[in-house]
Amino acid sequence: MRTATASAGKHYSAVKAVDGVSFHIAEGETLCLVGESGCGKSTVGRTIMKLVEPTAGRIEAMGTDVTDLSPARMRPHRQRMQMVFQDPYSSLNPRMTAARIVAEPLEIHGMSAPAREARLAELFDMVGLPRSATGKYAHEFSGGQRQHLAIARALAPDPRLLICDEAVSALDVSIQAQILNLLIDLQRDLGLAYLFITHDLSVVDYMADRVAVMYLGRIVEIGPREAIFTRPQHPYTQALVSAAPLPDPDADRSTRIMLKGEVPSPISPPAGCHFRTRCPKAMAVCSEVYPVWKESGQSRAACHLV
Ligand code: SF4
């Protein structure tokens, strides 16, 4: 990834990411970033948070170029964008009590001790954890409860944008549903914008207002959830959607599009369209010219056939 930009204000959060492709996330909206493992979707989230440094290009957050900001000057931006990771066990300090884990960001941002106490109780209530659990350590919670704790910590500084990076992938299906429903409730109550990074199309179907599909470090299609699932434009999106799990075991799977070969190395992507080595519809022009973005209905896609 060369460029990642994100901004969040009172009325909207916006993200412009990956080689000049841009998209925004409105207040109260969920944008799901989906693609195969290694496509760069997690790097987008981490780079927006400046948890990884870009090797080239720039990062914008809250309308500000933060590429060269010092940690101190980055702090106000981080306060308004928080991240929830896949594995809460490794992202939560095992030597801290739950109270310290959740209150630490408040301390960093200079909140007084009495105000922290009140905010801590509020956050535990918001995520459905008992206040009596504040003295427990991370290993004393179940996997689902640990993710509740991670969400409470992320919400502590009152962010406007929550980046959820495979936030339910490590959980059982029933626990996944609990966490997803909690996130939906929090979004409704707080007007949060979500960038939901996932490889799981059933999660996308449940959570997304809009979907951005990534392949090899670039976004290849973006559009409303319904359009992406029913009228995918890009051959890669068509393959992903055709392979999505069907709830009906007797449903017709004959239209499934099987992609051949491995994802090429992002270090030396194929010339022209990066997807051409696996695309069932590739043409001669695809190996020479990277396709420009074109609108189709409510979606936009980068493919010569659109
Ligand atoms: Fe396939 Fe060509 Fe479209 Fe790329 S531009 S997705 S190779 S048809």
Image (cartoon, rainbow, N blue to C red):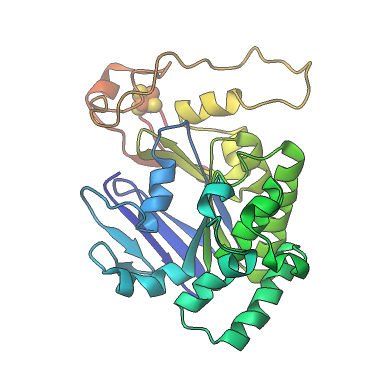
Instruction: Check the image and report above or below for 199 versus 123.
Output: above
The number of discs equals: 0
Instruction: Check the image and report above or below for 285 versus 129.
Output: above
Seen at 42% across and 57% down, the residue is 15
Seen at 38% across and 23% down, the residue is 263
The part of the image, by quadrant, that contains residue 58 is bottom left
Seen at 39% across and 69% down, the residue is 62
| The furthest residue to the front | 95
- Residue 74 horizontal side relative to residue 155, left or right: left
Image quadrant where one finds the N terminus = top left
Relative depth, front residue between 189 and 69: 69
- Residue 282 horizontal side relative to residue 221, left or right: left
- Residue 256 horizontal side relative to residue 4, left or right: right
The answer to whether residue 281 of the structure is visible from this angle is yes
Instruction: Check the image and report above or below for 183 versus 78.
Output: above
Relative depth, front residue between 115 and 227: 115
Relative depth, front residue between 258 and 111: 111
Q: Pinpoint residue 249: horizontal percent, then vertical percent.
A: 78, 18
Q: Pinpoint residue 242: horizontal percent, then vertical percent.
A: 59, 23
Q: Pinpoint residue 115: horizontal percent, then vertical percent.
A: 61, 86
Seen at 71% across and 37% down, the residue is 172
Image quadrant where one finds the C terminus = top left
Q: Which quarter of the frame holds ligand 1?
A: top left
The answer to whether residue 155 of the structure is visible from this angle is no
The part of the image, by quadrant, that contains residue 289 is top left
